[in-house]
Image: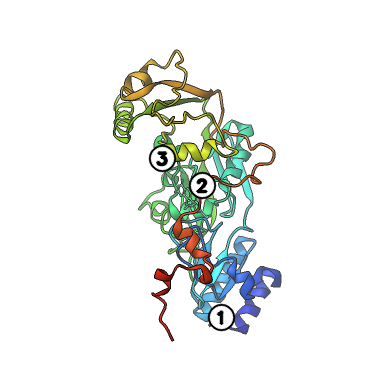
């Protein structure tokens, strides 16, 4: 299906450099963020513009070859994997920010723009793009649209669907559609809402108009230490029920805290001592409403850092970061992916049929 005629046609559209057919090249795209699944795509093509996407899709439709769009490949559902009889359309080269309009608080971008890059570009205007999946330094806005991605700040600001105003999409036969309206709600059914979260099944998003929000004037980060998940969970409900809507709420157990504190990202979180008493954070003034709602906390609420603007990573990357070994050992399942067969324990080898 993905024969020489098709490969030649694709190379004619995007240039031979941007058509990957060698097994080693295709292997790079055989996985996404879901470590348990792997598929070797038949061909990988990397268009650089909307017109190239249109021409590629028309060619594939003419050859009746299926395709899968792909952004950065961080998805956790295997949605960016393509079978050997399909073409993988990688959109990372379509990474232009066409417009940031501070007056109307909108930005128009190509699908391959990395999430964190958009907020960085909007920051000089006092604006940011609110949906912040934890993968935001790698994942693309196109992938966020297809997955309706969320993130810690979506508690307050809502998931991707809330922030997409309009889309230009290319359908499987190469037709181009405009969905939504940059100015607000269009007449008729909510086709943007239908496309957002459709995991690439309805077509390829080639131009995305997003809503930008003003950066918060101040950020207060609070930390409360709880003795059990139940009391921590009850505090979350109590905080929200009281009408206070935090921009984000995260729960960390001791193994997470240990992993962070033993790494280059150490942020001063309280470690639990072996006697179970821990190191409570120092109490500060001015946080009474939160303190009341965190009634189950073993230690008073404190504010470890404040005055941080924006929603980017709050811990700077020190020199030498990345060279230090992670304190977290890989899970058994992740390790299985690169298992050396000679070292597989006997009880697992029994599952392999003997010849
Ligand atoms: C460490 C880590 C943390 C994560 N944290 C979060 C999180 O906090 N919240 C969250 O929601 N997700 C999270 N994710 C999942 C993932 O990052 C998001 O789903 C993200 O939106 C995927 O973007 P991507 O560019 O990598 O898309 P890909 O993985 O490349 O693709 C995802 C899907 O989008 C489709 N697609 C990609 N581009 C387009 C396009 N232009 N048009 C149409 N369809 C397209 C693909 O076909 C596929 O179905 C995390 C993943 C990792 C690895």
Q: Residues within 10 Å of mark 1 (few under 14, many from 20)?
A: some
Residue beneath label 2, please?
328
State the residue in front, 177 or 77. 77
Residue 218 pos. (x, y %): 52, 23
Q: Is residue 245 above or below residue 66?
A: above
Res 44 → quadrant: bottom right
Q: Earlier in the sequence, mark 1 or mark 2?
A: 1
Closer to the observer: label 1 or label 2? 2
Residue 323 pos. (x, y %): 66, 46
Lateral position of residue 148 relative to residue 264, left or right: left
SS category of the residue bearing label 2: loop
Residue 221 pos. (x, y %): 48, 26
In the rendered image, is residue 103 in sight? no
Residue 158 is marked as: 3
Lateral position of residue 101 relative to residue 249, left or right: right
Q: How many marks?
A: 3
Residue 2 is marked as: 1
Q: Residues within 10 Å of mark 3 (few under 14, many from 20)?
A: some
Q: Is residue 109 above or below residue 92?
A: above
Q: Earlier in the sequence, mark 2 or mark 3?
A: 3
User: CB of residue at label 1: within 8 Å of ligand 1?
Assistant: no
SS category of the residue bearing label 3: loop
Lateral position of residue 34 relative to residue 318, left or right: left
Q: Residues within 10 Å of mark 2 (few under 14, many from 20)?
A: few
């Amino acid at each position: 299906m993905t024969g020489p005629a098709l490969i030649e046609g694709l190379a004619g559209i995007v240039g031979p450099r941007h058509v990957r057919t060698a097994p080693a090249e295709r292997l790079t795209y055989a996985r996404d963020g879901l470590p348990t699944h792997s598929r070797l795509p038949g061909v990988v093509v990397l268009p650089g513009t909307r017109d190239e996407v249109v021409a590629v899709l028309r060619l594939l439709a003419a050859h009746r070859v299926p395709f899968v769009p792909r952004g950065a490949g961080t998805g956790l559902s295997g949605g960016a994997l393509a079978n050997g009889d399909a073409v993988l359309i990688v959109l990372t080269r379509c990474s232009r920010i066409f417009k940031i309009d501070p007056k109307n608080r909108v930005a128009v971008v190509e699908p391959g723009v990395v999430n964190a890059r958009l907020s960085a570009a909007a920051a000089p205007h006092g604006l940011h793009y609110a949906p912040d999946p934890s993968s935001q330094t790698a994942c693309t806005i196109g992938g966020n649209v297809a997955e309706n991605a969320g993130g810690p700040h979506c508690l307050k600001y809502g998931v991707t669907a809330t922030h997409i105003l309009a889309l230009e999409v290319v359908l499987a036969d190469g037709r181009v559609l405009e969905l939504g309206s940059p100015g607000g709600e269009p007449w008729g059914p909510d086709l943007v809402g239908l496309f957002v979260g459709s995991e690439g099944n309805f077509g390829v998003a080639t131009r995305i108009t997003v809503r930008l929000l003003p950066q918060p004037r101040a950020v207060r980060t609070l930390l409360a230490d709880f003795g059990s998940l139940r009391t921590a969970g009850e505090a979350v409900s109590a905080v929200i029920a009281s009408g206070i809507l935090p921009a984000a709420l995260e729960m960390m157990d001791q193994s997470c805290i240990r992993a962070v504190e033993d790494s280059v990202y150490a942020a001063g979180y309280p470690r639990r001592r072996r006697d179970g008493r821990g190191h409570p954070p120092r109490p500060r003034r001015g946080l009474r409403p939160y303190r009341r709602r965190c009634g189950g906390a073993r230690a008073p609420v404190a504010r470890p850092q404040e005055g941080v603007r924006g929603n980017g990573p709050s811990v700077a990357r020190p020199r030498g970061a990345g060279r230090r070994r992670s304190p977290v050992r890989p899970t058994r399942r992740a390790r299985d992916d690169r298992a050396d067969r000679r070292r597989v324990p006997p009880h697992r080898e029994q599952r392999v049929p003997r010849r």
